[in-house]
Image (spheres, rainbow, N blue to C red):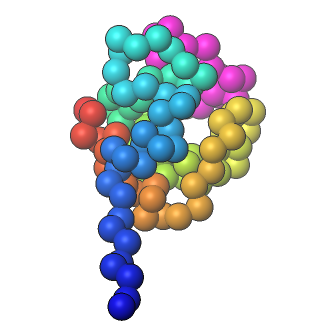
Amino acid sequence: MPLPSAKPSDGATLFKQQCATCHTTNRSDPVRQGPSLFKVIGRQAGKSDGFHYSPGFGNADFVWDDARLDAYLANPQGMIPGSVMAYRQPKPETRAAIIAYLKELN
């Protein structure tokens, strides 16, 4: 009997599994190792009240959008030298699901 095909995880589940250790999705929880990602789409990079960013973000002169989040999740240090985020996601479909979830928070 063949095994059922795996159901792809949704963005909220992926975020909880891969991102929630360091990031929250609201402004009421205490700041963790990373800033809250509530309303990150359209936010100036390196700017979030109550969070002290790594030195690389001092020169980040852009606003987060889908393409920049995708590039950052694929290779944080490659996009922002001096970033201390250790997470990297090589799978485009996983990055897309997480970004879609973050867009829901806007």
- Front one among 79 and 104: 104
In the rendered view, does 54 fall on the left or right side of 66? Answer: right
Identify the main secondary structure in magenta: loop
Q: Position of residue 67 (x, y in %)?
A: 44, 52
Is residue 2 or residue 63 the one in the foreground? 2
Q: Quadrant of the C terminus?
A: top left
Task: Check the image and name the residue furthest to the top.
Answer: 50
**Against 13, is 37 above or below?**
above
Where residue 88 appears, as percent x and y from the top left, is: 62, 50
Q: Magenta region: which residues?
A: 43-60
Work out which quarter of the rendered image holds the N terminus and state it: bottom left
Q: Is residue 14 left or right of residue 89?
A: left
Residue 43 visible? The answer is no
Reply above or below: 37 against 9.
Answer: above
Residue at 59% in and 31% down = 60
The image quarter containing residue 8 is bottom left
Foreground of the two, 58 or 32: 32
* Image x and y of residue 21, in percent: 54, 31
Q: Residue, x 47% and y 11% (percent of image)? A: 30
Q: Name, please, the residue furthest toward the bottom.
A: 1
Q: Is residue 51 magenta?
A: yes
Relative to the observer, which residue lies in front, 47 or 4? 4
The answer to whether one can see residue 97 in this image is yes
Whether the magenta-drawn stretch holds residue 13 is answered as: no
Residue extending farthest right: 82
Q: Is residue 52 above or below residue 18?
A: above
